[in-house]
Image (tube, rainbow, N blue to C red):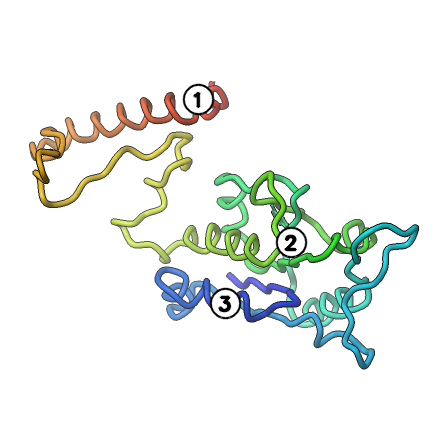
C-alpha cells in the first residue's frame, strides 16, 4: 500500500514512521510512505500556503492553488483510491474505518492548518474526511500519523501471528482482556491461576469473559452497537 501525506510541516512526520512496526513495514515493502512539502507547490516568492478569509474573521485559510498543484502532480503518476482530509469534523476514525482503508492500494492524506482549507478543496478534491476524535489539534499531522499507523498495522504480513491485529481491542467489538508476564508473584500481587494452568480451553474462556466484563465496565456503548 502507498500513502502520500501532504503537509506544511514534513519534519513532523519523520519520527512516527521511523520506529518499530511502521519502520519494519516500510523496510519489508508492505507500505510506502511519501511525505510532500506543500510549500514546494507554491509559485510566489514567499511560498505562501495561507491567506485571509473572504468575509473577514479571525485566522487564516489554506490556499487552494498549492494543494491542487500537489494533488494534480501526484495523480498524474498514480491512481488513488481516496483523497483524505484530516479534519475534526470528519467521520470518526474507528477500527472499522481503518480496516476498510487497509484494503486499498493508494491513498493521499492531506493535513490541514490554521482555520482550515478553502472549502472548494473539500467539495471538489477530497473524497473522505476523517477525524481522530472530538478535540481540535493544531494541525492534521498528528492525526495523519495516527491514521497511517492504524492502517499500516492491518496490512497482511505487517504483524506476525503473535502480534496479530485480530486479537486487538475493537476488532471483535470487545476490549482486549488483561495480560500478564513474569514474575508470577510480585510483592504479593499474583497472576490469575488460570493463566498458569496450561489449559488452553479454560484460558480462552477466561479471556473472553474478561473481555466482556471490561467492555461492560469501560465501553458499554460497544456492546449496544453489536446488539
Ligand atoms: N485536525 C485538527 N484536529 C483534528 C482531529 N481531531 N482529527 C483530525 N484532524 C484534525
Query: Residue 220 — which label?
Result: 1
Residue visible at 71% across and 71% down?
76
Question: Image height check: is 46 above or below 22?
Answer: below
Q: CA distance from mark 2 to mark 1?
A: 32 Å
Question: Image height check: is 210 above or below 47?
Answer: above
Pick whichever of labels 3 and 2 is earlier in the sequence.
3
Query: Residue 199 — which label?
Result: none
Query: Residue 82 — which label?
Result: 2
Residue visible at 76% across and 55% down?
117
Task: Tell me whether circle 3 and circle 2 mark residues in contact (CB < 8 Å).
Answer: no
Ligand 1 has an atom within 8 Å of the beta carbon of the residue at disc 1:
no
Secondary element at tag 2: strand
Q: Residue 44 placed where, x, y %?
A: 83, 78
Q: Residue 8 placed where, x, y %?
A: 66, 67
Q: Residue 111 placed where, x, y %?
A: 65, 58
34 or 101: nearer the eye?
34
Q: CA distance from mark 1 to mark 3?
A: 37 Å
Q: Quadrant of residue 50?
A: bottom right
Q: Residues within 10 Å of mark 1 (few under 14, many from 20)?
A: some
Amino acid at each position: 500500500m502507498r500513502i502520500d501525506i501532504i503537509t506544511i510541516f514534513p519534519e513532523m512526520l519523520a519520527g512516527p514512521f521511523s520506529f518499530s512496526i511502521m519502520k519494519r513495514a516500510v523496510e519489508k515493502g508492505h507500505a510506502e510512505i511519501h511525505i510532500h512539502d506543500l510549500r514546494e507547490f507554491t509559485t510566489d516568492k514567499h511560498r505562501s500556503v495561507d491567506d485571509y478569509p473572504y468575509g473577514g474573521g479571525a485566522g487564516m485559510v489554506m490556499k487552494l492553488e498549492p494543494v491542487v498543484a500537489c494533488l494534480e502532480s501526484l495523480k498524474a503518476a498514480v491512481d488513488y483510491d481516496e483523497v483524505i482530509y484530516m479534519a475534526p469534523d470528519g467521520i470518526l476514525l474507528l477500527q472499522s474505518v481503518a480496516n476498510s482503508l487497509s484494503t486499498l492500494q493508494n491513498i493521499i492524506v492531506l493535513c490541514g492548518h490554521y482555520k482550515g482549507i478553502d472549502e472548494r478543496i473539500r467539495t471538489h478534491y477530497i473524497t473522505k474526511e476523517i477525524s481522530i476524535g472530538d478535540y481540535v489539534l493544531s494541525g492534521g499531522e498528528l492525526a495523519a500519523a495516527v491514521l497511517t499507523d492504524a492502517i499500516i498495522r492491518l496490512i497482511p504480513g505487517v504483524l506476525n501471528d503473535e502480534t496479530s491485529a485480530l486479537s486487538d481491542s475493537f476488532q471483535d467489538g470487545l476490549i482486549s482482556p488483561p495480560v500478564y508476564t513474569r514474575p508470577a508473584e510480585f510483592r504479593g500481587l499474583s497472576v490469575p491461576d488460570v493463566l498458569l494452568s496450561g489449559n488452553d480451553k479454560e484460558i480462552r474462556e477466561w479471556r473472553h469473559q474478561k473481555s466482556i466484563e471490561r467492555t461492560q465496565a469501560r465501553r458499554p456503548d460497544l456492546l449496544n452497537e453489536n446488539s
